[in-house]
Every structure is written in structure tokens, then in C-alpha cells.
Amino acid sequence: MDTRSRPRAALLATLLPLLAITAALAAEPAPTYPDADASDPAKLGWMVGSPPPPDRILRFDDGSYFRFPAMRWSVSNFRQLMPTVNVSRGLAAPTPLPRAMRDDIDDVVFQPLGSNRTMTWQDSLKANYTDGIVVLHKGRIVYERYFGVLGPQGQHGAMSVTKSFIGTLAAMLAADGTLDPSRKVAEYVPELATSAFGDATVRQLMDMTTGIRFSEDYADPNADVWAHAAAGNPLPKPKDYAGPRSYYEFLQTVRPEGRHGTAFHYRTANTDALGWVLARASGKTVAQLLSDRIWSRLGAEQDAYMTVDSTGTPFAGGGLNTGLRDLARFGEMIRNNGVFNGRRILPAAAVADIRRGGDPADFAQAGYTLLAGWTYRDMWWITHNAHGAFAARGVHGQAIYIDPKAEMVIARFASHPVASNAANDPTSLPAYHALALHLMKSR
Amino acid sequence: MDTRSRPRAALLATLLPLLAITAALAAEPAPTYPDADASDPAKLGWMVGSPPPPDRILRFDDGSYFRFPAMRWSVSNFRQLMPTVNVSRGLAAPTPLPRAMRDDIDDVVFQPLGSNRTMTWQDSLKANYTDGIVVLHKGRIVYERYFGVLGPQGQHGAMSVTKSFIGTLAAMLAADGTLDPSRKVAEYVPELATSAFGDATVRQLMDMTTGIRFSEDYADPNADVWAHAAAGNPLPKPKDYAGPRSYYEFLQTVRPEGRHGTAFHYRTANTDALGWVLARASGKTVAQLLSDRIWSRLGAEQDAYMTVDSTGTPFAGGGLNTGLRDLARFGEMIRNNGVFNGRRILPAAAVADIRRGGDPADFAQAGYTLLAGWTYRDMWWITHNAHGAFAARGVHGQAIYIDPKAEMVIARFASHPVASNAANDPTSLPAYHALALHLMKSR
């Protein structure tokens, strides 16, 4: 491969999945995309056949795998495209998730944000390009659907939902004394001393209130987001490549912008830096830590996995892939303040720290018009609504939505064509809340 | 990456794992290697640290991952180096393997082939660079050891043990009528009509008695084995690369040499071609087929996985990676003529076909001095000894050894520095047989 001669569009496409994760704020003209049925990856037959037809083969290196609608296949098959590391479930029997399926959920009606018409729950799933969704009520599966190429046995990219796992691990290590959030990042990772992260506290990383320069201007070939993606790309670097060669090398190049602790800025580099801090505090990669501390104790029914860069570093900012029901198990454990299937997995203090939320004034400065009153804490999104709901959110509509008052957990994988939650929130957030009210009524 | 300018040694090293699988007959001067303790991958600390020290980082593209002793880490971590496809175990609880551990096995004594001294079982494990070994007697684990970076939760490259899985699937599809071994290969795969495989029968593929040119002369840069490895390499091809770009494209270039059905020649390309036939006969890739027909019905405790080429084709000739106990479960199912845990998984006829063995005259022509009297059938090695033992064999000492008379199954992963079973057979085969006799005595 010689990327110098490769069309720029292809190069950009190669980097897209890493970028998409941080694209939530990018303002782009809205193109028209084929709808959920027309873009169904099973119907389109990607990578089917021995060999697949040439126009149905998706590759990592030419970027074809992440163009819409091909991306809808790739999010369920990242491991076939790039190197990954296992997050073991252990070897014991999975913890059963009891089932109490309901047939009244598809008809739940809600009003999408910014709309004066109503929509049914069932219709929202296609509007959101849902690949799979599980709803738990009081710990039982009451609803479960799969679309396209995802099934109960598949593993789907969680993308930025990964961040909430990393934030949870940080809260866990903070609660048990392994990690001191008040210490400076450079105390854990001396290599970051001269970067913008060096004099931030670990707490500021956990809440993304660092003052770092991490531009996401896709029109600018020198934007930091390209450098981040290129550094983490596991393919061999082009011969004339002179930039950072791994996530860790990239983090050392991040420059300051503004002051730490004054505003929330959603920047993936913070999670990668937090992953490095966790690795140094625990002596384990975040993949090992996630397996040892959570995944292997949760009774997951599938191993999870993380994508890795060329030095074996898991992509903390967005590289986790899991089964859908296992995502729901994790959410249910969080809803139960750290206990699942009678076993304490997280210290209660860790979940309390998440649910407490962040500083509303810090959050307000980020300008999320659809998320008024929300905050960000431990890499979770806290609604501060009347139900105390909070969420993990991925850029193409992946989500864990926990509503404590309704005793409801929603786990969703999706592959919305627009790399921004602003595109799927209008038909997601009010649907989640309407379902919560419905479940509370009908208990 | 521009392979034109890369030192040839590095290029060759990149291709090594694919090559090693077919290297059993290569005659090379015997270099001196560090012993099992000195080459212990855990002690050497490959890929440990955040980031690992530069001289402990292993990469696929520069070939560093497969130089000895680094290779001892890589065989337990292929998925961190290249794209892979999952072989799902399903979602149910694993089938328990009962345990009846014995402490008398380490002291079993045997005489290595070609030696006039004795060796203990325990010492054989280090002589063989064993990474993990499980012995089942009457279906119970009586012995289990792990070394280096492998543990019960790990997945290790099975290399050519993969071939026996593919042969078993073929025997299975033949037994249930999905596949007709008497038909010509080109009837299933028209694209192979003009290759050497086209007018061979499927049975000749299954028993590797095709007459195909597949040279393994490492000194010859035009040897077929290099083209095979380059075609299957999942990395982007160099710009000036004009060869086949996938396993399937490579197979179409294989030319005839000799006549079909007259001699056994151990050539990996046969298994890749058989994998293609199975895909066409079943409509599934061998990875899907293995999951659907065997792995998900065996109660495996871990998913397995296969490496893939750039078109998503699993490497049928050597790409399978499994947990050690799951390899033992598979072996125990075969020992029980297709039944495991009370469930029929293979038709009895399929196992009978394997155990019947191949044509001794065909086998004799291959000149395996250590394997006098053996045959090859359905991609299994049949000893035809008094116990009716038969085996799956991988090039660095991976093995499933089934001794029906002793009711014993041995599953072993290893990373012997010499890419030839001739290097580890002298301390393996007599050890297995001595253990069989010991277990029979002490029942």
C-alpha cells in the first residue's frame, strides 16, 4: 500500500470509523440516504458468497467498508476487517436473563422531538436504523428485536458507548482506591507531562472538562482528528508518514486550548488518555481490566472484543464490540447500583458517582440543543430528568439507556447513516421516555 | 507499506505462518534454538506494558511476530495481529468436562524415537515447547497443564489441525448426502475447471492424493508456496503486485503435476480447495459451517475463530484458533464416533470413514520415515497401530491424538521452533503411546 497515490477520498474513508466516533458536533449538509429497508445489509448481501461478488466485497484499506450503506454490515463485523483483542467472558455458564415478552410495546406512541406528529415505537426502530434492541423491565427481557445482519449471537460495534465502560472502570478504580481522580494525569503517565493532558486531573479526563485542542474540522487536512485516526490505524504506515504511530504517541502531541475544568467538550482523546491512566494505575490494558473486573463476573453470554492499534493498544475511545444482550446485562448491573444476579460487581460508590452527574454550567457550554439540562459524568450522559435517567451513547445510535424510576434498561445497536446523535435523538429519547411511562403504568 | 523496498528477510517472515503449515517436509540445517524456558513468551514479556517496550512490540507487517521465540506469543494471539472471523459456540452453557485429575502421569517414562535413553512425560512437555496439554481418559480430564502465555481462557492457533476439522466437515456432508466425494471438483467449483484441481475427485482432495504442483522450495522466489501466502495475506497488496489476490484466486492458478489418485502428497492447497467445495455444497463458509454443524452443538466453552484473507475467506488450510479444552471436546466427540454429552453431532458413518484410513501404498510414497505404516484419510493421520490411534497434526506440534483402545484423547498446543512434526514426533508419539498403556494398566 502506498497511500500517497491513493485518492484522498479513499484515505478519508479508511479513517472514517475512528472519526465518526467524534463527529457528533460536525455540521454537514444533510444528504439523502436510503431508508432502513433499502439499506438492509442482509438484503444487500455484503460479503456473501464464496467469494462474494466483487461489488459486494468490503475492505478496510480502501475505505469501502465504512461507506453507507456498506457500513451497516461492517458495524457487526469489525473483527473481519482489522486486528482485535478478546475481552473474555470467562468459561462459566452465562447468567440467564429471564424473559417476560410483551406484545404491547410496538404500539407505544410518542412525539418525536421537533415534530408535531406522533410515531409508534415500532416505526422508530426503522427511523433509527436499529440493528438490534433489547428492553429489560425489572430485570426481565420484555422486548427484543434484530434486523439486518445482527442476531443474538452477533457482536456489534459499541463505538462511543465504549467510553462509558472506560468511565465506569475509572469510577470503579477510584472507589476502591486504585486510582485517585484528584491527581494530575502526568503523575500516572509521565509521557503526557508536556502534552495538554499533563496538568489536567484524572477527574477532568473522566468528565471531559480538559482544555485540549482536538479539532474536528474535516475540511482541514491538518485537523487533529485525522492525526488521531492515522495514528491508531493498524495498517502499516505509508513510507513517508512522519506522524504519531499509535494512540499513545498521538496523545503526547495534543496541545492545550482553553483552561481545564471550565467547560465540557466531548473529545474522544480524553477517553484514550483515561485508558492510558487506567493501564498505568492497574497494570492491565483496558481490555484485560474490562474482562477481569466486569465482563467475566457479569455472566456475559459472549466474549466481547476491542479493536487495537499497531502496538496492541485497545481503542479506549470507541473500540468495544459486544453482544446486545450482554450490553443489556451491563446496563442492568448499573441500574442495580453495581449488583447483578446477586453478585456485587461495582462498588455502590462508583455507580453513585456516575448518577450524581457533572456540572450543569460546564455542560451547557457545549451547546447541545437537544440535551438541555443534561450533564456528563464518568463518561456517562446524565439526563437529570424526573426519572433520573442516564445513558451511554454511540455515534450511530448505539445506546444503553437506564431509567431507574421505571426500572427499565434499553440496549440498542444501530447504524444510522448520520454520524451524530442529533440525527437519531429526536426519535429515540422521547420513545425511550414514552416506553418508560408505559411500563410504569402497566406494571 | 511498500514491499518492494522491504528487506527480503522481512517479507519472508511476514509470510511464514502461512508457509510453516506446509513446511513439514522442508529439509533445513538445524539451527540451535533457545529451550522452552529460555523462550517462554511470558518471561520475555512480548506485548506487555502500556505501551510495550519497542523491542517487545510484535507486528504482522514486518514479520517480527513470527520469528522465534516471538512466535511463541503470537500463536496464542493471532487475532491481535490480523483480521479474523468468529466461530460461535452459541449462547448456551458449556458442556462440562468432568475432572478426575491424576498425579502419576508426569512420571510416565518412554523412549524417544531414535534415542537409547528414556524420558519422562513431564520432561517431554518442555522438549516439545508445549503451550498447553489436556488428557482425557474415558471422557474425564486426568491431566491439564499450561505454559507461557496460554491459559484455559486462551485461544491458540491450531494450524494444520484445522485440516482435520475441514476433512471432518467433508466426511459429515458426504455422510448426509450434501456432498458426493466421487464427483469432480469442477462440478462444485466451476472456477477450478482449468486448474489442476478441476478433474480431481472430491475424495482425492479429502485424502490429498491429487496430482498438483505446489512447490515448497523456500530458496526459490517463484515457489508456489510464496504465491499462496501472498494471495492470502490480508494486508493491502503492494502497488506492483500482479499475483492472485485471495486464496480462491490462487487455487485457480495451481497447475497439474503427476496423476490424481496415485500418491499422497501433503499439500495445504488441497484443504483450501476442499474448503471452497464445502462452501459451494453447503452455501456457507467453512467458519459458518463449523459453527453451525459442530462448534455450537459441542457445548464448547469458548468461541473459536479463523483468520481470513482480504475477501473474507477463512483460511481452511490452517487458520483455526480454539481453546485447548474445546479441542479436547472435539477429540472426545470423534472418539465416541460422533456422540458427545449424549448428543449425536456427526453421523457414525463419517467417523467410520475417517478411522478406516487411506491407501497404505499411496501414503508410503510420501516418505515419512517416522510414520511407517500410517495413512491419511479425510485430512486425519491414521496410525494403524494396535490401538487404532489417529491424529490431527499441526506443524509446530499442535495435535489431537485419539487412542480408541485406551479410551484416551490428548489435545496439545505447542510452538516448537522447527516447522516440522519430524522435530517433535520423536518425543511425542512414543510419549502418547506410553501414556495410553499406562492408563489402560491402571484403570
Image (cartoon, coloured by chain):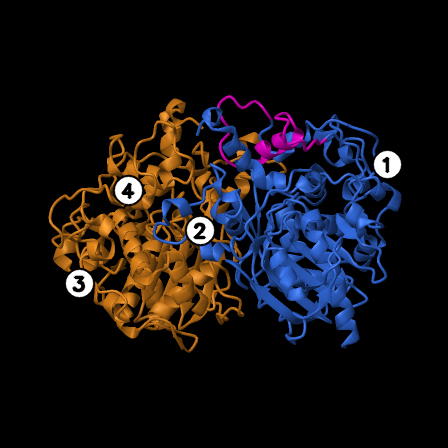
Chain colours: A blue, B orange
Q: Which residue is mark 3?
A: B182
Q: Label 2: how many residues lie within 10 Å, few (<14), some (14-19) or many (20+)? A: many
Instruction: Pinpoint residue A424: horizontal percent, then vertical percent.
Output: 68, 52
Kindly indicate the quadrant of the structure image that contains residue A405: bottom right
Instruction: Pinpoint residue B428: horizontal percent, then vertical percent.
Output: 33, 54
The answer to whether residue A235 is magenta is yes
Q: Tell me: residue A431, above or below residue B346.
A: above
Q: State which quarter of the image contains the N terminus of chain A.
A: top left
- CA gap between label 2 and label 3 equals 33 Å
Q: Which residue is mark 4?
A: B250
Q: Of the residues shown, which amino acid type is indicated by label 4? A: Phe
Q: Nearer the viewer, mark 3 or mark 1?
A: 1
Q: Which residue is mark 2?
A: A46
- Residue reaching furthest to the front: A116
Who is closer to the viewer here, A120 or B124? A120
Q: Tell me: residue B95, above or below residue B75.
A: below
Q: Label 1: how many residues lie within 10 Å, few (<14), some (14-19) or many (20+)? A: some
Q: Which residue is mark 1?
A: A262
| Circle 2 SS class | loop
Q: Of the residues shown, which amino acid type is indicated by label 2? A: Trp
